[in-house]
Each structure stands twice: as C-alpha cells, then as structure tokens.
Image (cartoon, rainbow, N blue to C red):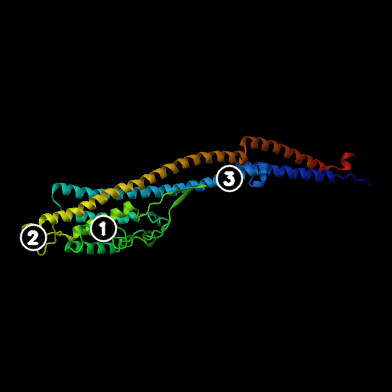
Amino acid sequence: MTFVSTQGQALEQVERLRILQNQLADFQNQLATGKKTQTFKGLGTDIIASKRSRADFASLDNFINNIDIADRRMKMMGASTAEVQKQARAVLQAIELQTQQGEIEIESIQDLSGKVFDLVVNLLNEQDGDRYLFGGAETRTKPITDSGTMGTYLSTRINGWLNGTITNQEMIDSYRERDGNNLHDTLMGYSAPLAQGEAKKVFVRVDKNAEIDYTILANNEGLRDILAAVGTISKLTESIDEVTLDPNDDPLTTIVPPGATQQERNDNFFGILNDLASMLAESIDKIDTDRFNLSQNIGQIGELKKSYAIEKKALADTIGNVEDADMNEVAVKLNALSVQLEASYRIAGFIRDLSLVNFL
C-alpha cells in the first residue's frame, strides 16, 4: 500500500504557529505594560540610545537629590545665622538704649546677654538629622560645647580688671584676641577641628565637573566674635553690682568698676561696654557676608535644578520614544495576528486529517 506523507507540511505549520504564538505573546505583553520589550536586548539597534538616556536621567536624579539636600541645609544655616544676628542686635540695642538714657540696669543686661549666649550656642550646633551644619566636613562632631571654661576665663580676667591688675586695653584684648594668652577658640569650647583650623569645607556636587562650597564654620570671625562679646557682657554685668554707688550702698561690699573717683569708674566701665557694643555691631555686619554667599548659592542651585528638570523631561521623551509601544498600533497588530493565528490553526487541522483515502 502506498502512503502520502504530510509530516513535512505539519512540522512546517507547527513552526509557523510557534512564531505566531510568540508574536502574540509579545503584543499582549506590550498591551499590558506599555513597553515594546522587557529586556534591553529586545530594543535592537535602539539599545544604545536607551541606555545612554537612562544613565543621564539617573545622573540628573542624583544631582537634583544633592541639590535638594544642600538647599535644605543652606536654608537652615541661613535661618540660624539670621537669628544669631537678631539676638545680637537685641543685646546691642539694649546697651545703646540704656547708655543714651544715662542709666544702666545691670541685672536686665546680664539676664538678656546670658539667655542670648545660650541661644547662640544652640544655633551654632544646628543639625540636619544627625549632621552638624556649622562644623564643616566634621559633621558628626559638635561644633561648640559650653563646658564653662570660657566663663571661668572671663570671670578671672574681669576680676583682675576690677582689682586693677590688668588695664582696660588688656581687658579688651582678653575677649578680642584669639591667641594663646587670650580668649582662644579652645577656651570658648569649640571642637578640636575648628579650634585647630583643621575642619574641611563642605561642598555639594551639582554637576559632573562642578561643586559648590557652602561652608560656614561656627568659629567664623563674625559668629565667634558675637559669642565672645555676648559672653563677656554677661560675665561683666554678673561681676558688677553697680556702676554708680547709691547713698544706701555699702562701698566695702558693693562691687563697682575700677577707679578712684566716680568719673574714673564710669569711664572705665563704659570704655569696656562701648567696645563690646562696637564688637557686636562689627560682627553683625560680618555675618552679612556669610548670609549673602548662602543666598547666592541657593539661587545658583535653584536655577540648576530648573534646567535639570527640563533636561530630565527631554531624556524621558527620548526613553519613551525608544521603549514605549504605540497602543493603537499594538491593538491593530494584535487583532490581525489573532485572525492569522486562527486561520493557521484551521490549516494545521486540515493537514493533520489529510490522507490518500480521503484524497481518493
């Protein structure tokens, strides 16, 4: 008996069905995900454009994240330095007002300056999370600690001034100068990296080849001098009972500024107080430079962030053009492929049933 073999046609048709089924699965996946493929390999020649665009997109995301963090920290630093200036002005205005009136309320100035000193210390220890902002790159080290050494040193010097063992100028040098014989940064409680000038600067990377320095150290001249001046005012007013003796005051137990006469006592006291007021005014102005630099940096990174947002959109469009599937086109192709697949199944069934008997 002679047979007509249909195995060849059947195998060929099975292979065609397999190809159609794979295509059908691809179109269904595109319809479900909106993407042409789930692997870079499936992009063919567009793979390079996709990878480059995605790498650039991720890089911009990193820079924007850096900018957001730095922007937050710079604004916190700006708010802290502005508050330091505000508190220093309050002490300065209190001194100027009472000096103009010709009377000095020792207790009120001492109370105000003491509170401002504590507040300034807290402001210089401002943190973003667990990172100190005014310690430079030493972000885990507290910039300043009020251990009492500064107060002890100032009290000792003020007592020497009251006793006449040091002059007015020596007293002024005590709080103005930062060398080893006077109020140096270690005595003030600054951390070792700050006191020794070893604190590194703080930068934010905003581009592949660009960094912005937004360092403000707690012992920058303006901030340091405000702390020194306010601390000295607090200790000075704490150490003196009266500038002018009242009739009921006991001259043996009432502590007054040094001097043989009332005029000398007034001159000595107001000579020191006016110098401290001048130091405060100078320091407030110096902080303006730090705040201006911060404002410049904030504006610069703000503009960069805007430009990066535009670049990200362009890259997202490129990625979309390369990777995203056209839903309308996919739907049309899917429908056509379904019809083609159904016809192929019918042909396969017909070939399977084909025989010489049926043919005859």
Position of residue 342 relative to residue 81, above or below, is above
Query: In percent of the image, x 43 and y 53: which residue is there?
Result: 202
Q: Nearer the viewer, mark 3 or mark 2?
A: 2
Earlier sequence position, callout 3 versus callout 1: 3
- Residue that badge 3 annotates: 54
Looking at the image, which is closer to me, 165 or 18?
A: 165
Disc 3 crowd rating (10 Å Cα; few below 14, some 14-19, many 20+) is some
Report the Cα–Cα distance between label 3 and label 1: 61 Å
- Residue that badge 2 annotates: 249
Query: In percent of the image, x 8 and y 57: which residue is there?
Result: 246
Q: Is residue 203 left or right of residue 160?
A: right
Asked if residue 169 can be seen in this view, the reply is yes
In what element is the residue under mark 3? Answer: helix
Report the Cα–Cα distance between label 1 and label 2: 31 Å
- Residue that badge 1 annotates: 173
Disc 2 crowd rating (10 Å Cα; few below 14, some 14-19, many 20+) is few
Residue 155 coordinates in the image, percent (x, y): 22, 63
Asked if residue 352 can be seen in this view, the reply is no
> Looking at the rendered structure, which numbered label has been put on residue 93?
none
Q: Nearer the viewer, mark 1 or mark 2?
A: 1
Query: In percent of the image, x 11 and y 64: which residue is there?
Result: 253
Earlier sequence position, callout 1 versus callout 2: 1
